[in-house]
Amino acid sequence: MTPEVRLPLFDGHPSYTILSAPRQVAAAIKREILQGALKPGDRLPSEERLAELFGVSRPTVRAALQELSSAGTVVVRRGRGGGYRVSSFSLDTLTTAVTEYIAFSLVVESLTPPQFLEVRRELELLSADAAGRRCSAEHLERLEELDGRIEAVIEGGAPQDPRAAFELDLEFHRALAEAADNPLLVSFEGAMIVVLHHLFGSGASVPPKRALGDVRAVIDAVRRRDPDAARDAMARHLTHSVKHLELQLPVPGPASA
């Protein structure tokens, strides 16, 4: 007798997820957007028409649209000419979504501070490297302005306000991401800054010289168009935050030639 062949579906643990009816409708609408059939600003058919097209009930369509609206994929407009329209996507939307995801993950402990800082380190090293290769004159001017303010703190001429130093450090990281000339890095940086406020609060517990350690070396490397030196200086700078939180993270060695 031929032995019975057991498939995952019949073991009680399917190897795939069966989407509910609303999620199937939502996925189909997303697919139309990704394929370009629906573009930002396009108005979706009415609930009644969508129900007819998909062969489902209007409550099912309504649930699908609410899911898409919550995700920012579509927006609803009231009044004459209203209805659901495809959102005009921007990296600001991504920044908000990433920020919320990381913040909630830290709260429920599905993400730990060391895991967050590990990813942040790699993104900051990338920003330093990219800025060292393609920083524009305008962005360099901004970094030079920050360099002067940081020097005043490091050399002791400026008031040693930990909160101000912490915010100055975050200004630097934002400016460096902008100097990297990659809007996605700027978007991620915006999200990370919000999360860093979650981790450090106002930054009052971080000594100013520790918060700004090796920042000037990063700026100097960018000034000299030396991406390897910028990465190395950034790696040193990031160890200060790690040590302050007493977190054990792998610290990258010098950049390879």
Image: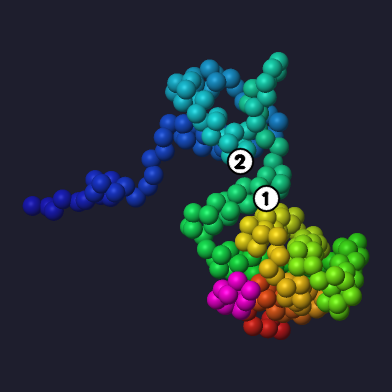
Q: Earlier in the sequence, mark 2 or mark 1?
A: 2
Residue occupying image coordinates x 83% and y 77%: 154
For badge 1, the amino acid type reads: Thr
Give the x, y percent position of residue 3: 13, 53
Disc on res. 34:
2
Q: Select label 2 or label 1 by which is in front.
A: 1
Element type where label 1 sits in the image: helix
For badge 2, the amino acid type reads: Leu
Give the x, y percent position of residue 110: 48, 57
Disc on res. 5:
none
Our reading of the magenta stretch's main secondary structure is loop
Residue 51 shown in magenta: no
In this picture, residue 227 sits left or right of residue 9? right
Q: Image quadrant for the C terminus?
A: bottom right
Q: Quadrant of residue 171?
A: bottom right
| Residue nearer the viewer, 228 or 35 | 228
In this picture, residue 99 sits left or right of residue 115? right
Q: Which residues are magenta?
A: 242-251
Q: Which residue is mark 1?
A: 95
Residue occupying image coordinates x 63% and y 57%: 198
